[in-house]
């Protein structure tokens, strides 16, 4: 279970970083401007939600597994 826990947590970080990068590209932060684009905010919210759900799902599954033992 420890190996899967590490893999899922790394996947959560990668998902968050990809969505954060999409947020920065959508708002044109890398070019020195800031445009408030709605789809960029959607990707940021989606990245936060998905990464947190990955982190919590591993912890919940581990807790349920320990309860059964």
Image (cartoon, rainbow, N blue to C red):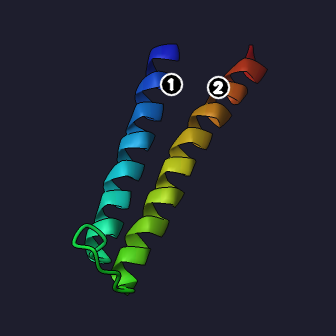
Q: Earlier in the sequence, mark 2 or mark 1?
A: 1
Q: What x and y, as percent, mark residue 27?
A: 32, 77
Does residue 26 appear in the picture of this structure? yes
SS at mark 1 in the image: helix
Circle 1 is placed at which residue position? 5
Residue 27 appears left or right of 49: left
Q: Residue at x 49, y 49 (%)?
A: 51
The quadrant where residue 13 appears: top left
Residue at image position (46%, 23%) is: 6
Front residue (pair 69, 61): 61
Q: Where is residue 39 in the image (x, y as percent from the top left)?
A: 35, 80
- Residue 65 point in image, percent of width and height: 67, 22
Vertical side of 55 occupied by 23: above or below: below
Q: How many marks?
A: 2
Quadrant of the image occupied by residue 26: bottom left
Q: Is residue 24 above or below residue 62?
A: below
Q: Looking at this rendering, what residue extends furthest in the front direction?
A: 32
Check disc 2 and report the residue beneath it: 62
Q: Do the residues labelled 2 and 1 touch (CB within 8 Å)?
A: yes
Q: In this view, does 48 lie above or below 41?
A: above
Which residue corresponds to the image point at 39% horizontal and 86% vertical from the top-left? 36
Q: Which mark is residue 46?
A: none
Mark 2–mark 1 distance (CA, rounded to whole Å): 9 Å
Label 2 sits on a secondary structure element that is helix
């Amino acid at each position: 279970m420890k190996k899967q826990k590490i893999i899922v947590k790394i996947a959560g970080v990668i998902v968050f970083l990809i969505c954060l990068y999409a947020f920065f590209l959508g708002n044109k932060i890398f070019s020195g401007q800031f445009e408030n684009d709605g789809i960029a905010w959607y990707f940021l919210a989606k990245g936060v939600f998905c990464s947190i759900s990955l982190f919590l799902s591993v912890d919940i599954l581990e807790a349920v597994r320990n309860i059964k033992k």
